[in-house]
Amino acid sequence: MPEYLSPGVYIEELAGPKPIEGVGTSTGAFVGIAERGPINDPQLITNMTQFGDTFGSFLPTAFLAYAVQHFFTEGGTRCYIVRAFRRNAPTVTDPAPDVASLVLTNAGGNAMTVSANSEGTWGRRISVQALAHGFDPTNPADIASRFRLDVFLDDAPTPIESFDLLSMNEFDASGIFPNANHVEARINGVSNFITVIDATNDPANIAPPAPMATPRHLGSGTVGLGTNGQALAPINLIGTVGTATARATGLMAFDGVLEINIVAIPDLVNPAFSVQDARDQTLAAITYCENRKDCFFVADTPSGLSPQAALGYRRGAAPSPATGGAFNSKFGAIYYPWIFASDPITGKRKLVPPSGAVAGSYAEADGRVGVHKAPAGTEDGFLNSAVEVERVITKGEQDILNPEGVNVIRKFPGAGIVIWGARTISSDPEWKYVNVRRLFNFLEQSILKGTQGLVFEPNDPSLWKRIVRDVSAFLKVQYLEGKIIGNKPEQAFFVKCDETTNTPETMDLGRVITLIGICPSRPAEFVIFRLKQTRFGGDVEE
């Protein structure tokens, strides 16, 4: 309480209601095989140009780039990407065998090592050329030690990057350290393709690299050849948790990213992998989302499955090529069959898993209508990415798949290729629909984030009233937006926090308990019109 010790006018600011803001629901999260880029380090990507700059081009034997492209095509606006990779063991003579590199020399020996900025055979496509420096009108005292380094890609005649007036001296012309023109300061973190290391052991050896008549490829020496690492398996896409000495890998690398909502790993069902391994690790990915409780997994079936085999894959039983425990989670959904999309590499059709396009449809429906809208149907389920389906599914075939939670991608005359299912893989009827689970994710995380300021407040009736007021105000906004339904707000939700939910025993434990009831919006999955024939002039009955 403020002190009033002398006469005067006092101004006090009173705390008002603290509105609860809704969290985001449309941020994607992808794990997969990429041409290049940071390894096991989630990167925020907001368009395909940014993806190309960070992770490179499309790979004919991997699905990550296709999935991300389809995510943006369908209406997604942002996602995090993790590149999975298994490094080869370093040796004394070759500390980074997976990174393509090249040593440039001068009269005193090794001058600098130029390396690709990430692992992979892609680095061999890079070539560099050291040249005499260009003109500098300031004519600094160390101009004689300056040089130029050009970077080429795919043997193009013109460089994609050029760095002039570089210096091997860590001190500038005035003897000040560090030198802003030192080769490491000028290139590392600036170049989109290479990093450099000053390899001179002698401080007096500051001569620039010897001029080169032609560019030389990285990886053309005896070490630092640049490889795609050890062979990946589905378990590497799920990864391992971080420790004190090693960072998390694969899907587990998202542990520190709180913003993700829609998770997909299209390379889990890569034909190069065992179907059994793919199914086992799909279970692990679903479990990851279930343990987090703030994101939802979009799963794929393998390609080439019949409707009966797709149902068996969901159940973990024959005639599926993979068996095991049935998929049963309210934090995941599975989609069948695969889709054909236009391949940017060949311009022809390519068969790909649908999870990237489906995740984009989730994000688009969230932005256009809201998270309460089922991401399916002829409008919100229309797939712009798809030019054909792997298999045309009939109504009779879907009749056996839909009740089991296998969401079918259908092809309809006049409507195109659409997502024609909106069910989770949960056996609990209360969590049957994708949009209901994701709506509760949104409500729970919004309330969790918006009520952090209540921790350590006095646990008394004034706190209880404050909780009821703030949560009710938030839920009323969701009611007005159609996310929860009822003829009036009292029918759509209730918030109870009083002496009946907070007994002396629970208060002694430091707990304040609030009971919230919500009536979610559910999709009209079966639209039924009942018609009857009447005689002319007869009564019409409803």
Image: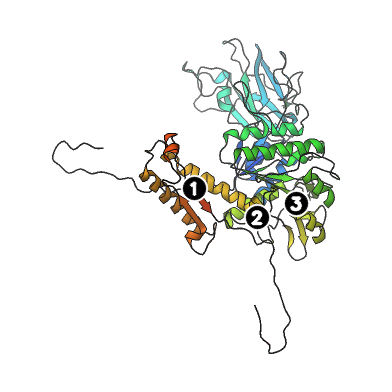
Which image quadrant: the C terminus? bottom right
Q: Which mark is residue 375?
A: 2
Count of marks placed on residues: 3
Q: Which mark is residue 486?
A: none
Q: Give the image location of residue 452, x and y in percent.
A: 45, 40
**Circle 1: element type:** strand
Spatial separation of the CA atoms under disc 2 and disc 1: 29 Å
Depth check: 520 or 216 in front?
A: 520
The residue sitting at 75% across, 45% down in the picture is 300
Mark nearer the viewer, 3 or 1:
1
Whether residue 101 can be seen here: yes
Sequence-wise, the earlier of marks 2 and 1 is 2
Tag 1: Cα neighbours inside 10 Å, few (<14), some, or many (≥20)? few
Which image quadrant: the N terminus? top left
Spatial separation of the CA atoms under disc 3 and disc 2: 18 Å
Sequence-wise, the earlier of marks 3 and 1 is 3
Q: Give the image location of residue 490, x and y in percent.
A: 47, 59
Sequence-wise, the earlier of marks 3 and 2 is 2
Q: Which residue is mark 3?
A: 404
Q: Are marks 3 and 1 in contact (CB under 8 Å)?
A: no
Q: Give the image location of residue 455, x and y in percent.
A: 42, 37
**Circle 3: element type:** helix
Q: Which residue is mark 1?
A: 515
The residue sitting at 69% across, 63% down in the picture is 526
Label 3 amino acid?
Glu
Q: Residue furthest left?
A: 7
Depth check: 186 or 318 in front?
A: 318
Looking at the rendering, which quadrant does residue 332 occupy?
A: top right
**Circle 2: element type:** loop
Tag 3: Cα neighbours inside 10 Å, few (<14), some, or many (≥20)? some
Depth check: 387 or 214 in front?
A: 387
